[in-house]
Amino acid sequence: MDWSFMFDVFRQLVSGIPLTLQLTTLALSVGFVLAISIASAVNSGIAPLRWIAKSHVEVFRGTPLLVQIFLIYYGLGQIPALRHSFLWPFLREPYWCAVLALALNTSAYTAEIIRGAIQAVPAGEVEAARACGMSGFLLRRRIVWPIAVRQGLPVYGSEIILMVKATSLASIITLTEMTGIAHKLISSTYRVFEIFIVTGALYLALTFVISAAISMLEKRLHAHHAHRRS
């Protein structure tokens, strides 16, 4: 292998890391806010809201992210009302289409993570808190949410890692994050093997750092919980 060439590829690919992290952060932030609303709607007593939320989860979990990106990037422009709305200056841009597709996709998975984490809260803990006079917001803040966070964090950590890797699909709508830069380098050099080795190594490094950070946070939360119980 040509190590000098691979180092040059590495240097160029590193310039795409900020966009990769930016897409990931924005998508996860917007997706998490949406997921809270969706998870609440799924458990709502209002049937239409419940149906819409469940449909959202099924559609975005049941179809490929690649198809979702294509539909948003190429499909929204086919709607005349949307082209003449205030949203069009944003939705005609590949960047915002990628963020929207990633956010909608992760919101479906995150809503299920939130719902599962809350359901995993032991009923005995809730009943004991109610027996002590806790209810409403105080019960959720002191008992339900802390336990749900500890239960859901490992699964949500996997979702974060999946979203980092999913940003590579943004290259198909002309965004030059790491994979987009890799495609440009391949088209000019035809050296697929070395370029994708370096690309894969960079994604592996990013996901390793994120995984380590989540593991540290998980241990910290469990240690804090054990300390409080003792």
Image: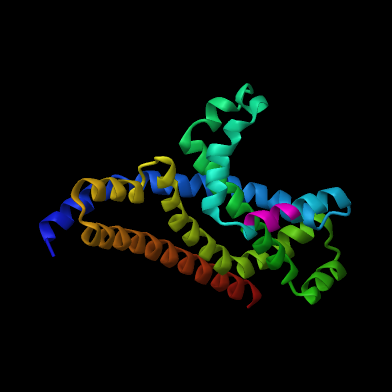
128 up-or-down from 210: above or below: below
Quarter of the view holding residue 193? bottom left
Along the viewing direction, whichever of 150 and 194 lies nearer the viewer: 194
> Residue at 20% across / 56% down in the picture?
191
Magenta: main secondary structure equals: helix
Along the viewing direction, whichever of 214 and 8 lies nearer the viewer: 8
Residue 23's spot in the image, x, y percent?
Answer: 46, 45
The range drawn in magenta is: 55-60
110 up-or-down from 33: above or below: below
Tell me if residue 193 can be seen: yes
Q: Quadrant of the N terminus?
A: bottom left
Q: Quadrant of the C terminus?
A: bottom right
> Residue at 35% across / 59% down in the picture?
203
Magenta highlight on residue 191: no
Magenta highlight on residue 56: yes
38 up-or-down from 114: above or below: above
